Image (tube, rainbow, N blue to C red):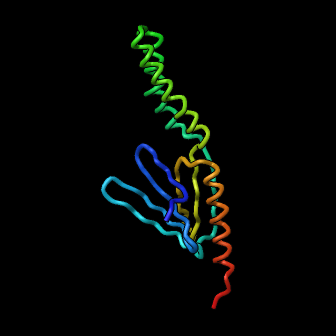
């Protein structure tokens, strides 16, 4: 079984696996894992949106770019410039990754209740998952009852 969508953040890890009749969300914890299953026949609506992860951007800026600027502009010295440059080399791709991927929220409405799945996912992966999931939901819900 391969994972269709994976999110690794500082405080949590989660994976989404698309099956023929359901979507399985695996929440990986430090000592235990949690499995949530969303059956396709119960899903009423799916809504997705992307937002800029401001908190992540602020944390990276504060703890990587701030010290890098201080080392380069205030401390000065060859070692300080090397360390500051190294912090910049790490921080800029991380910031670019957050701005490119953004925080994606997938809201699944079933039985009148909304369940949110949040994470930093690549846009192409989300698009592919949504297309396959919508096709699967339509196939399950349009299947004649026996």
Residue 80 is situated, as x and y percent measured from the top left of the image, at 41, 14
Residue found at the far front of this picture: 1
Where residue 47 appears, as percent x and y from the top left, is 64, 59
In the rendered view, does 49 fall on the left or right side of 94?
A: right
52 to the left or right of 30: right
> As drawn, which residue projects farthest toward the top?
77
Q: In this view, does 134 lie above or below 79?
A: below
Q: Is residue 1 above or below residue 51?
A: below
Residue drawn 42% across the image and 65% down it = 35
**Farthest residue toward the left?**
31
Quadrant where the C terminus sits is bottom right
Asked if residue 133 is positioned above or below residue 58 in the image, the reply reads below
Number of dots carrying numbers: 0
Residue 84, image x and y in percent? Answer: 45, 19
Q: Residue at x 54, y 37 (%)?
A: 54
Q: Where is residue 88 in the image (x, y as percent from the top left)?
A: 50, 24
Quadrant of residue 93 within the rendered picture: top right
Residue 13 lies left or right of residue 121; in this view the side is left
Which residue is depicted at the point 55% across and 40% down?
Answer: 53
Residue lying at 60% horizontally and 37% vertically, measured from the top left: 99
Where residue 83 sits, quadrant-wise, is top left
């Amino acid at each position: 079984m391969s994972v269709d969508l994976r999110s690794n953040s500082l405080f949590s890890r989660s994976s989404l696996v698309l099956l023929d009749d359901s979507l399985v969300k695996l929440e990986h914890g430090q000592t235990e894992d949690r499995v949530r299953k969303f059956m396709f026949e119960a899903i009423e609506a799916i809504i997705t949106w992307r937002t800029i992860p401001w908190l992540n951007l602020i944390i990276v800026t504060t703890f990587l770019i701030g010290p890098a600027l201080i080392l380069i502009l205030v401390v000065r010295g060859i070692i300080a410039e090397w360390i500051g440059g190294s912090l910049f080399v790490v921080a800029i791709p991380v910031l670019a990754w957050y701005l490119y991927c953004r925080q994606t929220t997938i809201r699944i409405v079933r039985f009148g209740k909304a369940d949110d799945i949040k994470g930093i996912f690549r846009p192409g992966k989300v698009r592919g998952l949504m297309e396959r999931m919508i096709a699967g939901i339509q196939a399950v819900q349009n299947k004649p009852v026996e």
